[in-house]
Amino acid sequence: QVQLVESGGGLVQAGGSLRLSCAASGRTFSMYAMGWFRQAPGKEREAVGAISWSIGRTYYADSVKGRFTISRDNAKNTVYLQMNSLKPEDTAVYSCAAAFSSSWWGERTSYDYWGQGTQVTVSS
């Protein structure tokens, strides 16, 4: 079992920044990747990006490329999502997820464990 706990959400003005954290605990030693997803009201959950746990390779959705950065601290079993130049359309509940096998990073079914999510609201 793996437990994921997100933190760092909140209210920010457009153009501002936030950093989300996702701390993993439990059976993390064989984790393959961690991803970030978001879900806005009335919309489907969408992939934001992911990072491979061993080599740190990152992947991003086109909508956030150049604005968001994913990083990880293996010693702390924590992944971060640095969000800059935030836009109102980035408003959503952001969730992290852990994958234990190699699959397409943008697919929800690739992930085995999910956090509860943290709200990010960007005001215009």
Image (cartoon, rainbow, N blue to C red):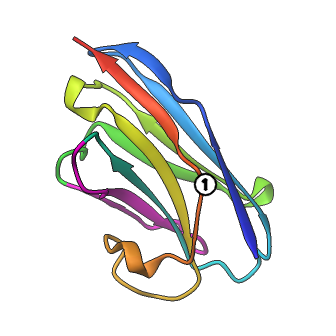
Residue 77 vertical placement versus 19 (above, below): below
The residue carrying pointer 1 sits among few (fewer than 14), some (14 to 19) or many (20 or more) residues within 10 Å by Cα, namely: many
Q: Is residue 82 visible?
A: yes
Q: Which residue is mark 1?
A: 72
Q: Is residue 24 left or right of residue 69?
A: right
Q: Position of residue 57 (x, y in %)?
A: 45, 67
Find the magenta span and give its range.
Answer: 42-61
Q: Quick one: SS at disc 1?
A: strand
Q: Quadrant of the N terminus?
A: bottom right
Q: Quadrant of the C terminus?
A: top left
Which residue type carries mark 1? Arg
Q: Quadrant of residue 6?
A: top right
Q: Residue furthest front?
A: 42
Residue 11 vertical placement versus 54 (above, below): above
Q: Quadrant of residue 84?
A: top left
Q: Position of residue 50 (x, y in %)?
A: 43, 62
Q: Judge by depth and name the residue closer to the eye, 72 or 34.
A: 34
Tally of numbered tags: 1
Q: Position of residue 12 (x, y in %)?
A: 40, 15
Q: Is residue 4 left or right of residue 76?
A: left
Q: Position of residue 34 (x, y in %)?
A: 53, 65
Q: Is residue 55 visible?
A: no
Q: What residue do we see at 20% from left, 31% from top?
A: 89
Q: Judge by depth and name the residue closer to the eye, 52 or 34.
A: 34
Q: Is residue 47 magenta?
A: yes
Residue 5 vertical placement versus 56 (above, below): above
Q: What residue do we see at 29% from left, 36% from top?
A: 67
Q: What residue do we see at 41% from left, 44% from top?
A: 69
